[in-house]
Each structure stands twice: as C-alpha cells, then as structure tokens.
Image: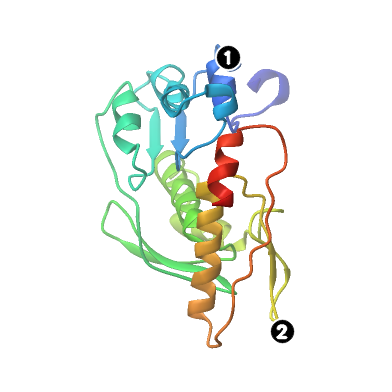
Amino acid sequence: MKNTYQVDNVVTEVSSHGLTLERVYGYDFSIAIVTNFTQNHLDFHKIMDNYLQSKLLLFSKYLSRSSSAKAIINHDNPSYEHFINACPSKKTQNSFVANDIKTSLNGTKYIVLLPSGETRRIHLNIHGNFNVYNSLACIATCFTTYSHLLTLDQIIQSLENFQYVKGRFEFHIRHRPFSVVVDFTHTPDGLEKVLKCGRQILLESAENGRLIAVFGTSGRGDRSKKTIVWT
C-alpha cells in the first residue's frame, strides 16, 4: 500500500465479524486500540464469551510482534485484564488519565495526566465520558508513537478543533427553549451512556430541566439487547 498509494499510515476500525472470519488475515497492526467491550452482535456470536474471544484476536493474533508495537486499552473497562493478557508482549505500561471531567452544552472539559506527571487541560467540542476515553486513546497513540512528528500542543489542538461525528451525540437544536440531540446508539450500554451524558449536561447547566428520550430498536440483528433496552 505504501508503494502503490504513497500512504504511510492507515487507521481502520476492525469488527468482531472481520476478526472471526479472518478478513484481516495478513495484516500486521503496529497499534491496537480498544476503548470498551459491551453486549453487541450476539446474533452472530451467540454468547458473550465468543464475542470477547473474537475481540481478543486483534491483540493475540493480529498485533505485530515488533518491539515497537503498542496496545492502547481502557483500564476502566471490566474486560481490561483479558485484553492485557492477550497481548504478545507486556514490557512497558504507561497510563494516560483523565481527571476533573465536566460535560456541558458547550462540550467536555477535563485534565489529562501524562505518564511523565505533566497535566494539561483539554476542552472537547464533543460530549460525554465515552468521548473522553476516545480522546485519551488518541493522545496515547500520538504521544507514544508520533512524538517525533507531533508536539503535545499540536495533539491537543487537533482534538480541540474537532467538531463532532454525525449521528453521535449530534446537536440539531441547541440553546433554545430545548435542545435536541441525535445519537446512533443501538446497544443497552450505549443508550445508558447517552442518557447519563444528557443528565450530566442538565446538572451542569444553571437551569432545571427534563431529559426526554425517544428511541427505537429497528432491524433484525441481536434481539436479546432489544429486550434490555426496552426494560
């Protein structure tokens, strides 16, 4: 790919289906990232353990054996130890920690603690703790792999310049008698996090307000999660 398309780096999202069916056979990932593991795709995997084992393949089978390879794993996720144990090498561990997290209508603020002990304040235009995890993964990846090309200021500035992902806690109406947010969430865990984010925004605002949820469960996929969502 480097010679054909003059591409030095490729970032790709790899599904559990793709890992199970070996759609990434022959890939040698230099960095593997996982931010969460919750119920999904049980129409394909049948049980959660099968789903977990498929996710672990990214680290146990497809992560490069090179000494420069890196695994970025969310320590707060209950399955953290499974992913750590799946890594081919565990030479060095560095922690990137978010403290003093606050979410409001204007975005999310937090203080990042780097492995060196240095702290920096960050203001994201996107909302929710789940996006704090995503941004920490970005910081960890860039800071540990591309520090010879990017300064910490450039990494943080890029995150702060990012506006939003369409359909992911996307505001369609803001700062009027009411705000309207659209989110593609389709799992029990995802819906819970979106509702908690909405509640956090209300708590941080100066006005008392109500959180009204309108949601559906379309499609013929994993029907077991639909029962959880509706209860």
Q: Residue 213: where, in percent of width, then height?
A: 64, 64
Q: Is residue 15 visible?
A: no
In this view, the residue in front, 193 or 69, is 193
Query: Could you give the CA–CA distance between mark 2 and mark 1, rounded to whole angstroms?
Result: 49 Å
| Residue hosting label 2 | 177
Helix, strand or loop at label 2? It is loop
Q: Which three-letter amino acid code belongs to the residue tagged 2?
A: Pro
Q: Give the quadrant of residue 214.
A: bottom right
In this view, the residue in front, 7 or 219, is 219
Q: Residue at x 59, y 65 (%)?
A: 125
Quick check: 119 above or below 188? below
Q: Residue at x 34, y 48 (%)?
A: 76
Q: Residue 170: where, in percent of width, then height?
A: 68, 61
In this view, the residue in front, 31 or 22, is 22
Quick check: 87 above or below 118? above
Q: Residue 216: where, in percent of width, then height?
A: 69, 51
Q: Residue 88: where, in percent of width, then height?
A: 32, 21
| Residue hosting label 1 | 21
Q: Residue at x 45, y 50 (%)?
A: 139
Which circle, 2 or 1, is nearer the viewer? 2
Would residue 77 appear left or right of 168 to someone viewing this image? left
User: Which mark is first along the chain, 1 or 2?
Assistant: 1
Image quadrant occupied by the N terminus: top right
Mark on residue 122? none
Quick check: 108 above or below 20? below
Give neighbour class at mark 2: few <14, some 14-19, many 20+ (Cα, 10 Å): few
Whether tag 2 and tag 1 are in contact, CB under 8 A, the answer is no
Helix, strand or loop at label 1? It is loop
Q: Which three-letter amino acid code belongs to the residue tagged 1?
A: Leu
